[in-house]
Amino acid sequence: MKCYLSAKSSAIIAFVLISALTFASCTKTAAVNTGSGNAVPSGSPGADTAKRQSQSALPVKRELTLEKHEQAGVFTMQKPKGWSVYKAGEYNTLAFMARDEKEPLRQIFCFSEIGPFYISEQQKKLEQNYVSSGGYPIQWLDMPVVAPLNGTSFMRKFNDILTTKIGKGFLSLYGMPKPEGFDRISVCSEHKLPDYFNGMGTALVRTLHFSNGKAAEGLFVVSGVPDAYGHAYAFMVTGITMPKDEFSDALPVLLKAVESFTIDQEYLKKGMQAIAENGEMLMKISKTLSQTSDSMIDYWNNRSKSEDIWSQKESDKNLGLERVYDENTGEVYHVQNGFYDYYQTHEEQYSGRRLQLLPSDDYNLWTSVPRTDNSLVIR
């Protein structure tokens, strides 16, 4: 059995990236309470509040602009300015990733086929015993067990798969970095989508990623199918991650970049000749584009508020932070974990403040962009 990480074709890559990100562009930027903006005279009762507000800050928004990138003889696209673009494989082994080297959590990638990996611990033990008893080597023996076979399990094991001999070999052969942030991942939710291929389950998975003290949102589309021998393959593993405070604003620009992805026609023609047996499959995929896009948009527009709240709470937990809001201003602040307990017994150190923990189900507060304030520390 041949074992590899590959891409069915460049046409699949373009289709999946556009489908996976089109729905996400419908997300709304979280509302930010910036106050009235009125000046407070010096010496007035609100002067201390104004001074404190001048010390606090919201995350700085980053502007993404696009520039043309050409992968000679293979594809062209409009990529975010300053981002690197990586290509791996040829024709039916084509893979793609674009990312910001200054912050690798800003990334788009697609692997159209990954496998085989195990879906049965028993099967893995059988093959380990076979090899240890003198049997022929099995290339995928260090692959993890993904059970149950669904999008959540796969994304949790994605980093393990990419660090196997097969995964590292494919990436290093073409000089493509491993996608960032998958060694620490939390899964928010999984939603069933219309199948891209008959008999294959397709899932949309929302995740959180943590790297170097930062959190990123992630959205992925994963299709998978088992074989008859305790293994499975994943298809069209496609998605994006962006730092949490940049995610909503970045999506429209990233969508434009994805929509500009254009395969060189001669390259595509040669690729289709090389994998002519997949021509019928590609035709079926193109026919489902509208249905799949509609399903994704419907999911995002109707996602539960509890998922957005979970995402904020999970991020704080992993980064060692908590949130408080000031009843005087309604502003939300990120503070170090344990600060509120300290504040309750040392309120005199924070004159004029009326701080409270966020109610567990207050959507507006939890989705407000939290400020940082250097005066809100344990003294």
Image (cartoon, rainbow, N blue to C red):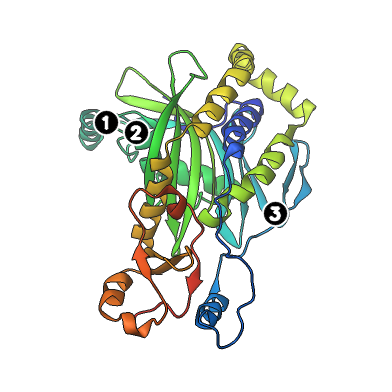
Q: Nearer the viewer, mark 1 or mark 3?
A: 3
Q: Report the amino acid beneath label 2.
A: Ile
- Which residue appears at 43% of the width and 14% of the height? 199
Numbered tag placed on residue 119 in the rendering: none
Element on which disc 2 rests: loop
Element on which disc 1 rests: loop
Upstream in the sequence, badge 1 or badge 3?
A: 3
Q: Nearer the viewer, residue 3 or 16?
A: 16
Q: Residues within 10 Å of mark 1 (few under 14, many from 20)?
A: few
Q: Report the amino acid beneath label 1.
A: Gly
- Which residue appears at 53% of the width and 27% of the height? 298
Numbered tag placed on residue 138 in the rendering: 2
Horizontal arrangement in the rendering, residue 257 relative to residue 49 (left or right)? right
- Which residue appears at 39% of the width and 65% of the height? 324
Query: Residue tagged by mark 3?
Result: 64
Check if mark 1's residue and mark 2's residue have beta carbons within 8 Å: yes
Figure check: 226 above or below 131: above
Q: Report the amino acid beneath label 3.
A: Leu
